[in-house]
Image: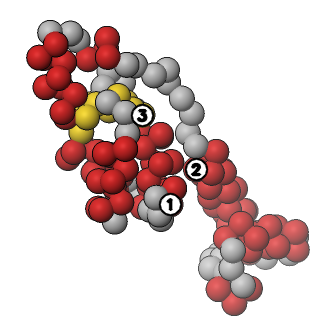
Amino acid sequence: MEDILIKTLNKMPIYFSSNKFSKQAVKYGLPRQFVVSGDVNTFLVQNADRGNSIRTWVKRAAQAQAVFLEKPIDVLVKPPIGLVPKWMHKEQVNAERAQALANAIGRYVASGMSIDKEWIDEYIELKGMSILETPIQP
């Protein structure tokens, strides 16, 4: 995994966003779970410097170049703030919906009420599981 991250860092411009870095790393073959888990952020903390915002980064070599040129890093290139990648947003929304469904199903089971089949079908679809793997607890 680290070789993919190093390759990605080498291909990035001097000033880049963590979203752009993650998207490029996934294109190079990094599993999305690695991005979602926060391991990409750990790699960036160890191998790049923070930009002016939480989601911007500067290559370490760029810091030395800025000092040599006697210019602030901001003058080199500063992209505008972007968005969470669409695929990551969908995963987050789906995870929240699956959790809400699991909670509602659990409440219905605990109260002895019948559960709508649509809820179970949607939960299974969101989790990508077969009916035998579906962990719903009262």
The residue under the point 34% across, 65% down is 1
Place of residue 21 in the rendered image (x, y in percent of width and height, measured from the top left): 42, 43
**Residue found at x 19% / y 18%:** 66
In which quadrant is the C terminus drawn? bottom right
CB contact under 8 Å: marks 1 and 2: yes
Sooner in the amino-acid sequence: mark 3 or mark 1:
3
- Helix, strand or loop under label 1: helix
Q: Which residue is mark 2?
A: 88
Residue annotated with mark 3: 17
Distance between the alpha carbons at the discs numbered 1 and 2: 8 Å
Residue situated furthest bottom in the rendering: 132
Depicted 26 relative to depicted 9: above or below? below
Q: Residues within 10 Å of mark 3 (few under 14, many from 20)?
A: many
User: Label 3, label 1: how many angstroms apart (C-alpha)?
Assistant: 17 Å
Image height of 78 relative to 126, above or below: above
State the residue position of label 1: 32
Q: Tell me the number on the disc at residue 1.
A: none
Q: Nearer the viewer, residue 19 or 98?
A: 19
Vertical placement of 124 versus 12: above or below?
below
Question: From mark 3 to mark 2, how far is it between C-alphas?
Answer: 15 Å
Q: Decide which of tag 3 and tag 2 comes sooner along the chain.
A: 3
Which quadrant holds residue 132?
Answer: bottom right
Q: Secondary structure at mark 3?
A: strand
* Residues at marks 3 and 2 touching, judged by CB atoms closer than 8 Å: no
Q: Nearer the viewer, residue 83 or 126?
A: 83
Q: Is residue 102 visible?
A: yes
Q: Amino acid at mark 1?
A: Arg
